[in-house]
């Protein structure tokens, strides 16, 4: 594997945080692999090292560190697909680290609670979930003593990446790279802005071809309350590994490729030329099935006694998938993070979209 599976038990809050970790070495010879093994992490450019005074692992300030936010459905293991695809193209003078955290209630990570979300009495369960996820990131980068991180997201990870940038702007570099952004709906009947800041000439609505009918109906409550729909959808998402294992692999591959553009299909065939995409199905099965944080090595607790120190641990209620869906079914106003039509002059934002971007179909 290109990644390591790790876990951290927070002594202050009792939270278990499961995450994946990848280290790409900079300044290497062209013939050598940029992937760092467990044996040479501490010696690589003196970037990742152990501080013997407090038994803490440190990522030096000269390294770059990216936080990866996965979409709804997978988990920290999806970082494997990103890193394995990116590694052959990697050429950089400095070391680069990637960290992907399982969000609360997912793959062994403790569920969100009012204890770990500030101002919990004044926020919705979805906001509490987002803030807990962001606070978990702070816990991990504090452990590695990383001053600032860049943000990388896919699809529904957009809301969490933007929320982290908003809540902890002092810990970000300002670089955010996103793929296939999930766009939160705007509630035209209410705004977080007040007074003269409101610009009524801006059309906040998203193009109709980017929203499926099912999503629209769910937003309007046709299928029931948000909590009920989220729980049902979360259960479906949680069954994906079983579906991958039970369906014929060629059927899964053929169905998936029908949703791709011509260019994407060529890329897919080039990536999996020999087995017809069976390796892709195996990767997807592995990346969706993290169980209770299977395979994690705790970095700050003796792994031989980790189960004996569960007394003050906040449990994992396996509600992460449902909470992800609830966030996707929220409006910008529900989450208190309204997109702005204007950007400060000193900032530059580039949004990249394909010509035929649309909501992925139910079949997809």
Image (spheres, rainbow, N blue to C red):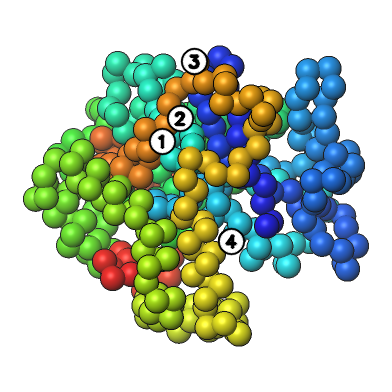
Q: CA distance from mark 2 to mark 1?
A: 5 Å
Q: CA distance from mark 3 to mark 4?
A: 35 Å
- Residue under label 2: 110
Q: Position of residue 197 (x, y in %)?
A: 30, 33
Q: CA distance from mark 2 to mark 4?
A: 25 Å
Answer yes or no: is residue 283 visible: yes
Q: Position of residue 121 (x, y in %)?
A: 30, 16
Mark 2 nearby-residue class (10 Å; few <14, some 14–19, many ≥20)? many
- Residue 73 lies left or right of residue 29; in this view the side is left
- Residue under label 3: 312
Q: Earlier in the sequence, mark 1 or mark 4?
A: 4
- Residue under label 1: 105
Q: Earlier in the sequence, mark 2 or mark 4?
A: 4
Quarter of the figure that contains the N terminus: bottom right
Q: CA distance from mark 3 to mark 2?
A: 12 Å
Q: Residue at x 20, y 38 (%)?
A: 227
Q: Nearer the viewer, residue 362 or 92?
A: 362
């Amino acid at each position: 594997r290109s990644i390591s599976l790790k876990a951290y038990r927070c002594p202050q809050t009792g939270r278990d945080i499961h995450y994946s970790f990848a280290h790409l070495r900079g300044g290497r010879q062209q013939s050598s692999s940029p992937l760092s093994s467990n044996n040479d992490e501490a010696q690589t450019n003196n970037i990742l090292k152990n501080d013997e005074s407090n038994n803490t692992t440190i990522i030096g300030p000269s390294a770059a560190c990216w936080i990866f936010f996965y979409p709804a459905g997978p988990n920290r293991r999806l970082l494997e697909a990103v890193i394995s695809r990116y590694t052959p193209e990697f050429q950089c003078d400095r070391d680069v680290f990637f960290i992907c955290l399982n969000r609360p209630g997912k793959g062994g990570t403790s569920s969100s609670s009012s204890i770990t979300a500030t101002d919990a009495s004044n926020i919705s369960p979805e906001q509490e979930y987002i803030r807990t996820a962001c606070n978990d990131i702070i816990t991990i980068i504090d452990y590695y003593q990383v001053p600032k991180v860049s943000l990388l997201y896919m699809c529904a990870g957009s809301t969490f990446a933007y929320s982290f940038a908003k809540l902890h702007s002092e810990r970000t570099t300002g670089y955010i790279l996103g793929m296939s952004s999930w766009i939160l709906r705007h509630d035209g009947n209410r705004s977080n802005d007040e007074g003269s800041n409101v610009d009524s000439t801006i059309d906040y609505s998203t193009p109709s071809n980017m929203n499926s009918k099912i999503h629209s109906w769910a937003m309007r409550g046709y299928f029931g309350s948000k909590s009920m729909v989220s729980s049902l959808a979360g259960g479906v998402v949680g069954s994906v590994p079983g579906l991958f294992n039970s369906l014929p692999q060629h059927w899964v591959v053929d169905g998936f490729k029908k949703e791709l553009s011509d260019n994407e299909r060529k890329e897919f065939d080039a990536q999996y030329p020999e087995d017809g995409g069976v390796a892709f199905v195996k990767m997807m099965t592995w990346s969706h099935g993290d169980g209770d944080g299977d395979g994690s090595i705790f970095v700050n607790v003796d792994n031989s006694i980790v189960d004996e120190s569960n007394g003050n641990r906040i449990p994992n209620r396996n509600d992460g998938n449902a909470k992800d869906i609830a966030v996707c079914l929220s409006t910008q106003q529900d989450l208190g993070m309204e997109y702005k039509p204007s950007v400060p002059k000193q900032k530059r934002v580039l949004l990249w979209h394909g010509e035929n971007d649309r909501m992925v179909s139910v079949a997809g």
